[in-house]
């Protein structure tokens, strides 16, 4: 049944969307892709970046993984299979995207497992906790600074702090830091709240995620941004000192 739905969907796509956008697909096939934006999102089935942003084929280069995380750059690069880093490298060096967006989200299972640590039902899995340990230091910080607060508050703080951690990790890739410094690449920390259908963007000045309203948006990390502005510790301290906004 589940698969039939996909096949029906593809039949509809072929007869509908594909036909209506024949020129676009022909252009993409002959000229190749030239997206200006890389979105690093979560694999969660509820938060499809293309649907959330109503984009068309060719508009965004996307990499999705558990909890929308960017691992630290491995220096020097080794021979392991760095899938997320390879996708980021191709988008930034190969496609020369102008924006990189890390898109976290509310009720993220990967972040929830990280919060729960050894208590998590997934703690014994082969790969999951190793992957999400990218944000282990930030997790420990959030749990310590927000001790006694409800789990939902702690999870939300970590969902957002993990996005900032990933943006900071992006700056550890030489070819990203150079482009940001040159002004040809802007990094963004976003968080989507699916319970209210609202997108939030990290504001390094206010040290919080602010609702995105209208069409104007400043980058979290541009040419003039100090690295300290994307320090997860600074963000966690700010969150821990505030009343929850939900
Ligand atoms: Zn998620």
Image: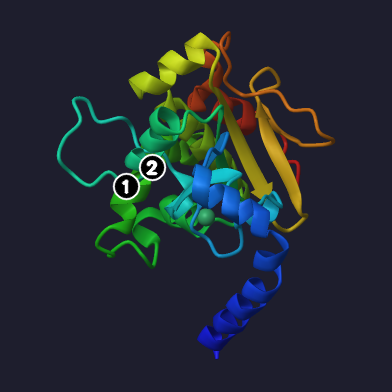
User: What residue did someone put label 2 on?
Assistant: 87
Percent of width and height locating residue 199 = 72, 44
Give me the C-alpha separation between circle 1 and circle 2: 6 Å
If the image is split into quadrants, where does the N terminus sit? bottom right
Q: Quadrant of residue 90?
A: top left
Q: How are the residues colored?
A: rainbow
Task: Kindly identify the residue that appears in the image at 68 percent across and 34 percent down.
Answer: 201
Residue in front for this viewpoint, 13 or 22? 22
At 36% from the left and 65% from the top, the residue drawn is: 122
Q: Estimate the x, y position of residue 30 in percent, counting from the top left.
A: 51, 48
Residue 73 seen? yes
Check if mark 1's residue and mark 2's residue have beta carbons within 8 Å.
yes
Front-most of 179 and 193?
A: 179
Among the 4 quarters of the image, the one containing residue 11: bottom right
Q: Residue furthest right?
A: 214
Q: Secondary structure at mark 2?
A: helix
């Amino acid at each position: 049944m589940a698969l039939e739905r996909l096949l029906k969907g593809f039949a509809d796509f072929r007869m509908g969307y594909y036909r209506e956008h024949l020129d676009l697909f022909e252009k993409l096939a002959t000229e190749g892709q030239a997206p200006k934006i890389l979105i690093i999102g979560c694999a969660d089935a509820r938060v499809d970046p293309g649907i959330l942003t109503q984009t068309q084929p060719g508009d965004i280069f996307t990499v999705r993984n558990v909890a929308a995380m960017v691992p630290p750059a491995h220096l020097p690069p080794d021979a392991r299979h760095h899938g997320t880093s390879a996708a980021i490298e191709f988008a930034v060096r190969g496609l020369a995207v102008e924006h990189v967006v890390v898109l976290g989200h509310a009720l993220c299972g990967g972040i929830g497992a990280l919060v729960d640590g050894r208590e998590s039902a997934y703690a014994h899995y082969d790969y999951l906790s190793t992957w999400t340990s990218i944000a282990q230091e930030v997790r420990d910080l959030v749990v310590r600074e927000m001790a006694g607060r409800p789990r939902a508050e702690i999870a939300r703080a970590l969902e957002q702090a993990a996005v900032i951690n990933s943006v900071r990790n992006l700056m550890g890739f030489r070819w990203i830091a150079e482009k940001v410094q040159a002004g040809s690449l802007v990094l963004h920390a976003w968080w989507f709240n699916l319970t209210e259908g609202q997108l939030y963007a990290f504001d390094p000045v206010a040290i919080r995620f602010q609702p995105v309203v209208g069409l104007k948006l400043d980058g979290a990390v541009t040419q003039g941004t100090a690295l300290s502005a994307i320090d997860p510790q600074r963000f966690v301290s700010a969150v821990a000192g505030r009343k929850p906004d939900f």
